């Protein structure tokens, strides 16, 4: 790709700007907005970062700080294509800050002003990549709330969406305390204008406007006075002249006036990916052989590299996310290691309670197995728990649930709000369940109760509530160190005359928030019964490696897997196709395990098993070869998993170097 000379994005620092923020040297400004100032920074290794520092007035607002803490934690959950990773943050600093990887390139509005609208494969790649980014954001339970051209950067390898979830932190709701609507005119949904409502559907409305703007260089509802723009958004059809015909249907769906009539981000990403694949076929030379395409968005992207001369020294970072990140001088895709760094410190969040956990067996992390029916599971637990003299007096009972009190103080009130948001969002569309969740607190027992009311619950709903609750409670325990709780108890109150305890677990000890029983005594083929991979290990494996040997081994192994698995599936639009966008290899040093995982929610179980067998073969031979090579290689075990993109993980194969044939 050619290099476009430019003054670059880094602007001179202002008098009074900080010299350092956290571990980063500040060399200039990247911009400023209502929430704070974004600085250009370098770490000690030369990694280029964008550091957003909150304005002092908001830093002094305790309510804002609480929301900022929560939004940073939520943002750390988000990972996926065309997103910029959150690397680090400090919500307790005098001026709270967060750091993301620096994405070289112009924002969409500046690019169009300089070069005109996007066209051809670049336009379809833009539509696909931004829809994929929103799909990942929404899957993590986050609503962007501030999609606009200024928040999309056109990097040399594809579009990157900025500020996911952080707009929520800036004000908490879409209407300020004085009743003034926030947002950028023309990039606000009709329901946001009418009632202040924001949600995934609102993000998709603005996505439709964004794609139209990228294709035509015009805002689809025009410009002018804000009230005139608002009227057109709520009442008139968008101006889509110049938008390619193939994109009309999906963009019009996104721009529907009623939220329920709009395509989801996932639907838009799939539709645009098909159009992108067709575009790739159209531009391929006649008679050319099909080739493996690791990143279809990057393959059709034609935006020149931005040469920014204002960086004082080149970025020479050794931090790299193997197998998933796109690298152009710095990491600009995938989730960086800050996600783990932002999680609660184990030494601070581990329960100090002396009572034994409810689940004494190391092979079980919850009362109710995924395969059990709610009625049977509830009966097994509640027969003992609701009796006048239970076998274990420390177990939660219906009586202790009824004695629990309402929330008191900031920590409990914020925790209840977080649970209400995360459970309602996560259990709604995905599980087709519209229940309500009432939270009670028993600090003397270190127990927190979540009562589910509404339609009758199935086992999958209980399991989903349990996982989401565990993730949220671990996050809130990291924000509020004083929270005295470690156990969370789910109560099925859908039949008020016969409530039942259906789940009880220690969210601090269950570091991976595993919500299924694991029987380690009976292993499936390809699973060694002597040990089991963990969610915690998988999280550790997703941290960028700094070891050159690990990077080399992972790169070679993942490319071998691509070649083996894609041999009969050479078109990237094939549902079975794997690439850097959905397949990764990483290492968990504390376990000595090499993890291989693919994020493929559309795979059926047969495809998963077939892929797992192929991945296990590559992984086993890799750890065997490196173990024989010696030189202090610390990994003799491997594990293979498939992720569903919404927080679910299925470990399918695992073993040691000694179990594979040489």
Image (cartoon, helix red, strand yellow):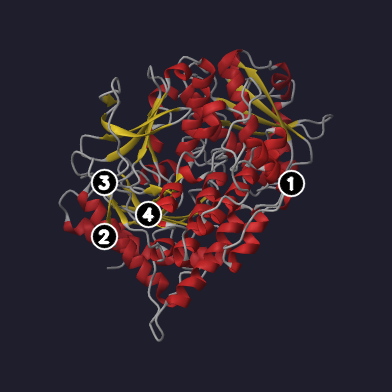
Q: In this view, does 482 lie to the left or right of 443?
A: left
Q: Nearer the viewer, mark 3 or mark 2?
A: 3
Q: Mark 3 points at which residue?
A: 308
Q: Residue 235: give its label.
A: 1
Q: Is 356 drawn above or below residue 283 in the view shown?
A: above
Marks 3 and 2 sit apart, C-alpha to C-alpha, by: 45 Å
Q: Name the residue under label 4.
A: 324
Q: Nearer the viewer, mark 4 or mark 2?
A: 4
Q: Earlier in the sequence, mark 1 or mark 2?
A: 1
Q: Nearer the viewer, mark 4 or mark 1?
A: 1
Q: Which residue lies furthest to the front in this view?
A: 224
Q: Residue 624: give its label.
A: 2
In terms of image quadrants, where is residue 195? top right
Secondary-structure class at tag 3 = loop
Q: Look at 67% across and 57% down and name the residue there.
A: 253
Image position, residue 300 (x, y; %): 41, 66
Marks 1 and 2 sit apart, C-alpha to C-alpha, by: 65 Å
């Amino acid at each position: 790709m050619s290099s476009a000379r430019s003054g670059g994005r880094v602007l001179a620092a202002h008098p009074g700007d900080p010299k350092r923020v956290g571990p980063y040297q500040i060399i200039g400004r990247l911009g400023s907005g209502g929430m704070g100032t974004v600085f250009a920074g370098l770490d000690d290794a030369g990694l280029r970062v964008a550091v957003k520092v909150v304005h002092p007035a908001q830093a002094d607002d305790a309510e804002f700080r609480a929301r900022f803490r929560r939004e940073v934690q939520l943002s750390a959950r988000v990972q996926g294509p065309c997103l910029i990773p959150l690397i680090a943050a400090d919500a307790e600093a005098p001026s709270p800050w967060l750091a993301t990887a620096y994405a070289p390139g112009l924002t969409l509005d500046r690019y169009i002003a300089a070069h005109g609208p996007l066209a051809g494969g670049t336009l379809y790649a833009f539509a696909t990549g931004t829809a994929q980014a929103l799909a990942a954001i929404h899957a993590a339970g986050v609503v962007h709330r501030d999609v606009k051209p200024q928040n999309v950067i056109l990097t040399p390898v594809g579009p990157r969406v900025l500020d996911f979830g952080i707009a929520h932190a800036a004000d908490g709701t879409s209407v300020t305390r004085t009743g003034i609507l926030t947002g950028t005119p023309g990039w606000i949904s009709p329901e946001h204008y009418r009632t202040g409502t924001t949600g995934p559907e609102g993000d998709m409305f603005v996505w439709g406007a964004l794609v139209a703007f990228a294709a035509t260089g015009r805002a689809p509802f025009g410009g002018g006075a804000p009230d005139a723009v608002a009227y057109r958004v709520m009442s008139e059809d968008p101006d889509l002249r110049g938008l390619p015909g193939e994109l009309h249907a999906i963009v019009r769906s996104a721009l529907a006036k009623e939220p329920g009539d709009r395509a989801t981000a996932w639907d838009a990403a799939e539709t645009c990916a098909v159009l992108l694949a067709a575009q790739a076929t159209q531009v391929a030379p006649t008679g050319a052989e099909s080739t493996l395409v690791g990143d279809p968005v990057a393959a059709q992207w034609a935006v020149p590299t931005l040469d920014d001369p204002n960086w004082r020294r080149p970025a020479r970072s050794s931090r790299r996310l193997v197998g998933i990140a796109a690298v152009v001088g710095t990491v600009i895709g995938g989730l960086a290691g800050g996600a783990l760094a932002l999680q609660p410190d184990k030494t601070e969040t581990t329960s100090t309670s002396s009572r034994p956990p409810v689940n004494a067996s190391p092979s079980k992390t919850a009362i109710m197995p995924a395969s059990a029916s709610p009625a049977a599971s509830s009966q097994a637990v509640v027969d003992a728990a609701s009796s006048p003299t239970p076998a274990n007096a420390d177990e939660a009972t219906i009586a202790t649930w009824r004695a629990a009190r309402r929330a008191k103080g900031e920590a409990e009130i914020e925790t209840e709000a977080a649970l209400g948001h995360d459970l309602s969002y996560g259990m709604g569309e995905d599980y087709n369940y519209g229940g309500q969740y009432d939270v009670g607190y028993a600090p003397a027992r270190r127990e927190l109760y979540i009562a589910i009311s509404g339609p009758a619950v199935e086992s999958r709903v209980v399991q989903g509530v349990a996982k989401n609750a565990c993730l949220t409670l671990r996050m809130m325990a990291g924000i509020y160190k004083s929270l005295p709780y470690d156990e969370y108890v789910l109560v099925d109150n859908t039949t008020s005359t016969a409530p039942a305890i259906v789940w009880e677990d220690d969210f601090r000890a269950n570091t991976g928030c595993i919500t299924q029983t694991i029987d380690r005594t009976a292993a499936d083929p390809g699973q060694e019964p002597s040990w089991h991979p963990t969610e915690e290990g998988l999280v550790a494996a997703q941290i960028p490696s700094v070891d050159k040997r690990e990077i080399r081994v992972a790169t070679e192994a993942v490319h071998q897997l691509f070649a083996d698995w894609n041999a009969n599936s050479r078109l990237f639009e094939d549902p079975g196709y794997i690439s850097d966008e959905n397949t990764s290899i990483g290492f968990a040093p504390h376990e000595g395990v090499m993890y291989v995982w693919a994020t493929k929610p559309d795979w059926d179980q047969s495809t998963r098993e077939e892929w797992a067998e192929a991945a296990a073969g590559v992984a086993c031979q890799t750890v065997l070869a490196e173990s024989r090579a010696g030189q202090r290689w610390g990994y003799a075990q491997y594990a293979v998993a498939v992720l569903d993109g919404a927080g679910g993980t299925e470990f399918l194969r695992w073993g040691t170097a000694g179990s594979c044939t040489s």
